[in-house]
Amino acid sequence: MPAMKKLVFAAAVMSVILVLGCISGPEEITSTSAKSAATSVKKVVPTTVKKVVKPAVKKKATPTTLKKTVQEFRNAVKAGDVSGCEKLTDKRLKDICIRDLAIQKKDASLCDKIGTASLKDICYYRQATTKKDKTLCAKITTPPIKKACEIKAA
C-alpha cells in the first residue's frame, strides 16, 4: 500500500510539473528523494510548448513619423486651419486639433466635426461657458458635464 501512495503522489507531482511547464516553458527543477533528503538532484524537465500565434499588432509610429504628425498638428492649430486637422490620420489627435480650433475661433459649429464624444462635450462646454450661451449645453451628452455647463453658462 505505501508503494501505491508513493506512485499516486509521484503521478500527481508530475502532472503539476507538466502543467506548469506548459505554461512557463522549460525550467530547472530541484527534487529530493525520500531516501536522501540531504542531497538534491537537479533535473531539467523537458516540456512541450505550443507556439502561440499572436494577432497582428499595429506598427508603432517611429519617432520621425510621430514628430511629423505632431508638427502637422501644431501647424494646423497655429494657422487656424480645420482642413489641416482633418488630414491628421490619428483620430484622437484630429479631434483634439478641431476642439482646439473651435475654442480658439470661438466657433461652436466646429464641435460638430469632432468624433470622440468626450472631446465634443468639452468643446460645447467651453463654447457655452465662454459665450454664456446655455442652448449649447443641450448638445452635451455626459450628464455631469451638461449640468455643470447649465450652471456656469447661465
Image: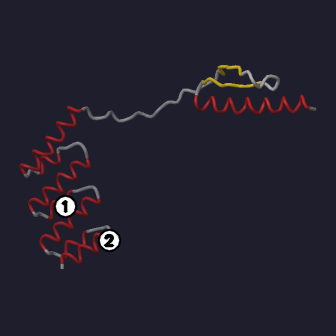
| Residue 106, picture quadrant | bottom left
Please provide percent x and percent y for residue 126: 18, 66
Quadrant of the drawing holding the N terminus:
top right
Residue 121 lies, with reference to residue 33, above or below; the image says below
Disc sitting over residue 6 in the figure = none
Closer to the camera, 36 or 110? 36
Instruction: Give the foreground label among 2 and 1.
Output: 2
Identify the amino acid type marked 1. Cys
Furthest residue toward front: 38
Q: Are marks 2 and 1 in contact (CB under 8 Å)?
A: no
**Which residue type carries mark 2?**
Pro
Where does the C terminus fall, quadrant-wise?
bottom left
Color style of the picture: secondary structure
Relative placement, left or right, of 47 versus 58 is right
Compare residues 152 and 83 and report the one nearer the observer: 152
Determine the image quadrant of residue 44.
top right
Report the residue marked by disc 2: 144
Q: How many marks?
A: 2
Against 72, is 120 above or below?
Answer: below
Whole-angstrom CA distance, mark 2 to mark 1, is 19 Å
Q: For numbered disc 2, what is the local secondary structure? A: helix
Question: At x 20% / y 71%, what residue is drawn?
Answer: 136
Tell me the residue at 60%/32% (across/down). Answer: 23
SS state under label 1: helix
Instruction: Tell me which numbered mark, 2 or 1, is placed earlier along the sequence.
Output: 1
Outermost residue on the bottom side: it is 154
Q: What crowding class fits label 1: few (fewer than 14 Cα within 10 Å), some (14-19), or many (20 or more)?
A: many
Residue positioned most to the left: 79
Residue hosting label 1: 111
Near-viewer residue (75 or 45): 45
Position of 2 compared to 27: left or right? right
Look at the picture and state if 122 lies above or below 83.
below
